[in-house]
Amino acid sequence: MHRSVLWTVPIAVLREVQRSQATFLAAAIAYYGFVSIIPLALLGLAIAQTFGGPGLETALHGADQFLSPAAVEVIEGSLADSRGSGGASVASLLILAWSASKIFRGLDIAFSQVEGVTIEKSILARILDAAIVFFAIPVALAASALLGVVVPYFEWIPFIGVLSQLSLPGVLVVAFFPMFYRFPDVDMSFRQALPGTVLAAVGWALLAAGFSLYATYAGNFQLYGVLGAGLLLVSWLYLGGIIIMVGAVVNVVLVGGTPGDRDGATAATDSEGTEPAPDIGELAREVEGLRADLDEKTMSRSAIESELKAYVRKRQRKGKATGWGPYLVLLYGTAMTLGAFYWLQGGWAILAMIVVWLSTLGLYVQLVLFGMGIQAASVPGRLLEVLRNARS
């Protein structure tokens, strides 16, 4: 039984990671995290240029054990050159606020995607979640980097390396726990949020250890200087995002729910779960009422046929002489006028034009009278159709 559980949980976690597209969400989080680190670094450089002193120089010497020589050289050059630092600081604040909001939105969407539940949050809840993101991610990054810089100064303490590696997961648990507890859109207790938090903290600690190993041996195999450091940082953020997503999936699987079965669902309250079943007789009356409304709004076949026949007869009557009569008159007048100009000259031509005009007018009057006669003859038929429609 215990062995089957050990196999079932990892398989379920793997399936949910694939279903929720955790790697894609982690890539988005890594991108906005990298974009936010750049303005944060610019702000740090601006502050260091303003308030730096001997302590800053000591910190840079300590950073040699954490950063590659190329990265340290770039930082020293940036600190020495203070041109444009004011404008860069303002731009960094704007970009930092934008990217931080994107990180918060990305994490919120990612947790909703993993949980399979989407609930509209209030403005106060969103502000609280954003504050958690502003606290958790910087603290996690700072704790990972700070231990790599500070530990070498305490090498005289026995087992300081082991203690630092063991203390980092604890710090990360404190930083990550509010995010794993607040961000899910389902009710989750402290105990239920703890496994994913511990997994994410341990995973980030291992990533920090790997980054420290690279910084230690960077002098032997540097990857294109600053470009390699940037690629390594993006990879670190991407893997860190995947670990956070896997931690969220682990919490969902251990709670016992399947996110795929809860897509689009909302959290139900106890009052909704205990709502009494509706009365069958009342449902039957509602169905009968709906059926009566449909019968009133539905036309019968005979009524539709009579309407169509009346429409066709009306269009046929309008398509008779009243439709093509004016064209016949125009054709007659044109032919007679051309004949008068061709065969007659002088006063005879003028007289012929007067005759043509009078005959054309007379023909048009005859056609109009003919059309009026047809309309008058169709009046009894229309009255009969009106009576039939009234009876039906």
Image (cartoon, grey):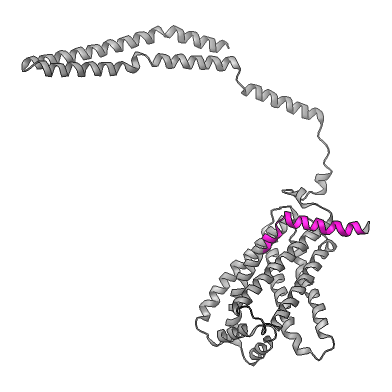
Q: Nearer the viewer, residue 249 or 308?
A: 249
Instruction: Give the extent of the magenta segment.
Output: 3-26
Residue at horizontal 74 percent and vertical 62 percent from the top: 245
Instruction: Name the main secondary structure of what is drawn in magenta.
Output: helix
363 horizontally vs 25: left or right: left
Assess whether residue 249 is covered by the magenta stretch: no
Q: Residue 130, position in %: x, y?
A: 68, 65
List the single residue furthest toward the right: 1
Question: To which quarter of the image does residue 146 belong?
Answer: bottom right
Q: Nearer the viewer, residue 106 or 14?
A: 14
List the single residue furthest toward the front: 220
Task: Examine the rendering and report whether any part of residue 85 can be seen.
Answer: yes
Q: Nearer the viewer, residue 344 or 182?
A: 344
Where 220 sits versus 263, above or below?
Answer: below
Where 366 sits versus 19, above or below?
Answer: above
Q: Residue 144, position in %: x, y?
A: 73, 77
Q: Residue 176, position in %: x, y?
A: 76, 69
Residue at horizontal 29 percent and vertical 12 percent from the top: 367
Question: To which quarter of the image does residue 126 belong?
Answer: bottom right
Q: Residue 21, position in %: x, y?
A: 70, 57
Where is the C terminus found, in terms of image quarters?
top right
